[in-house]
Structures are given as structure tokens and as C-alpha cells.
Amino acid sequence: MNQQAQPDLDRLTGRSGKSISGVLQSTARAAGQMVLGRYHDQGRIDIKGRGDVVSEVDHASEQLISARLLDEFPDFAFLGEESGFKPGDDEWQWIADPIDGTRNFVSHLPNWCVMVSLAHKGTPVAGATYDPLRDEMFYGQLGQGTTLNDEPVSVTGKSSVAECVIGLDLGYDDELAMRVWGVIGAVFPGMQAIRVLGSTGLGMAYLAAGRVDLYFCGGGNPWDIASGVVLIEGAGGTVSDRHGARVTMPSEAIIGSSPEAHADFLRLTERLSFRKDAGGYG
């Protein structure tokens, strides 16, 4: 993330008197519970691209999120996956993914979540990732660490890729997806296990909570990665783009792990096409 002066989030209070933490978590939970109630009543489903779908529930979730956030802080800008950008304050912007892992959601596969984040001058500073099926709330805020259902969590202390359970996702850019597979082909069997999750949000949250040791994916829009960046860094991890540089939004790739395993991954993949200029995101 940007190494700019850190904003004081504690001075921000919504119209209801809630803190940023309270606003983000209550909004993510409300949207998640609404989505869960529509799990078997998804309505119209449209195809946006290969493996990329949107349901009526995505739109309803985003409308709920937008209404709640802008009711609390009406001057903040808002960026949602389905509705796009609503201008506002130049410094502060809400970012929302109403259902991350919609392909899983519509197929009744249990890896999906709701993500709501806050960015300051383009840098994510707080984020809530909520999994309503398991009632798990991952929350991170600049300077306050990362929690799972209010209990502190951290990345694992693995020092090499060989020790890691690796989570990954392919994304929707076909060329980048093939480069992701190329990484696995080059590194295998030099890891403990591989898990394709189908939700970048949960993949990054699981890394922050120590459920996977390393996570990477081919590309990410702001709504896909904003919350996860805060979670990983707050949990003591390192997260970067494919060059090992700070994450910008959007990003062509995300690589996250403990600092030591992250460095080892960069070393092992240095000559692979995944690490070279690709196009697509960013």
C-alpha cells in the first residue's frame, strides 16, 4: 500500500454514532444475511463472461450496502462491482463487492462472501470480509491488526514455498489464468498442497487467518482485493503485485504470504511468465 501519512480513522463517526469498524462490519453482516436468505431464491442470473456471472441477489446486496454506507457518511465516494462509481469526497471512498464468488453462489458451492472496504486517497485502510454461511467476520483496520469474529489472527510463519498450503484463483483474464497454471506446473511438487478457492476475498481472508500459507491470483479489481490487502497486512503478512511491489487498484496479480515465504515465492517464480508484463488488469 501507499506509504503516505496514516489517516486517523478513530475521528470518523457515522450519523448513527458508529465507528468505521461498526459501520463496515454491520453493513457486511446485513448484506451477507440478506444474500444468505436468497441462497435458494436467486432470481435472474446473467452471464458477464467466461465463468463470470451476476445474479439479482448481487444487485440487491449492493443496493443495501450502498444505502447503509452513504446514510452513515453521505459525502464519501462509493465504488461497487455492479453499480460502478458514485463520486464524492476526494479523500474517502467506500468499495463493495456484494457477492465475491458469485459463480460459487449460483452453483450452491459454499465459498463466497460479502466484502466492504474503506479507502483513503486510493489506499485501503479498513475492510470487512463476511462469510454468512459460516458466520465468520474477518476485519482489518490500519494500525489495529486483523480479527476473525473479534479474535486476533495472523498469517502462518512458514519460511519457504515447500512448507506451504497454497490457495489460488485464476481470475477472468484467460492469458493471466494460463500464467497462474504455469506457476503451479513449475513449482509442483514443491509445496504441501494446492487449493483453488473460487473467491479471492475468502482466499485472502484465509491467508490472514492462517488457513492457507500462501495465496496468489491472476488479477484483481478494487472490490476483489481492497479488504484482503488490509486483512493480510494487519495479520503480519506481505502482499504485493506480481513484481513484488506494493498493491495498486486494480492489480494484475496478487501474491500474499508470510514475509519469508513471499520472498521465496518471488525467487522461485522470477523467470516465469506470470511475473512478466501481461496486460489485462492495471
Image: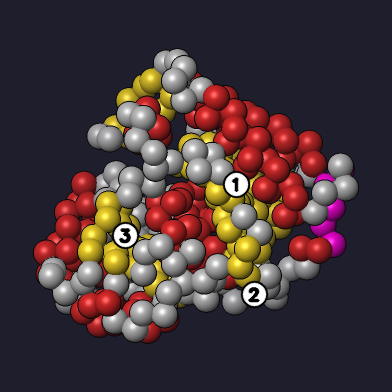
Residue 193: percent from left, percent from top: 23, 64
Pointer 3 or 2: first along the chain: 2
Q: Secondary structure at mark 2?
A: loop
Query: What's the amino acid at mark 1?
Result: Val
Q: Looking at the rendering, in which quadrant would you find the C terminus?
A: bottom left
Give me the C-alpha separation between circle 2 and circle 1: 22 Å
Image: 128 above or below 152: above
Q: Residue at x 81, y 63 (%)?
A: 10
- The relative height of residue 252 versus residue 35 in the rendered view (above or below) is below
Q: Nearer the viewer, residue 39 or 17?
A: 39
Give, as a single range, the part of the protein colored magenta: 11-15
Of residues 33 and 14, the one nearer the viewer is 33
**Amino acid residing under circle 2:** Gln
Q: How packed is label 3: few (under 14 Cα within 10 Å), some, or many (20 or more)?
A: many
**Residue picked out by circle 3:** 167
Q: Which mark is residue 116?
A: 1
Residue ID for mark 2 = 4
Q: Nearer the viewer, mark 3 or mark 2?
A: 3
2 vs 1, front mark = 1
Residue 235 figure quarter:
bottom right
In terms of secondary structure, what is the magenta stretch mainly?
A: loop
Label 3 residue SS: strand
Residue 21, x across and y down, in percent: 72, 55
- Residue 65 is situated, as x and y percent measured from the top left of the image, at 64, 36
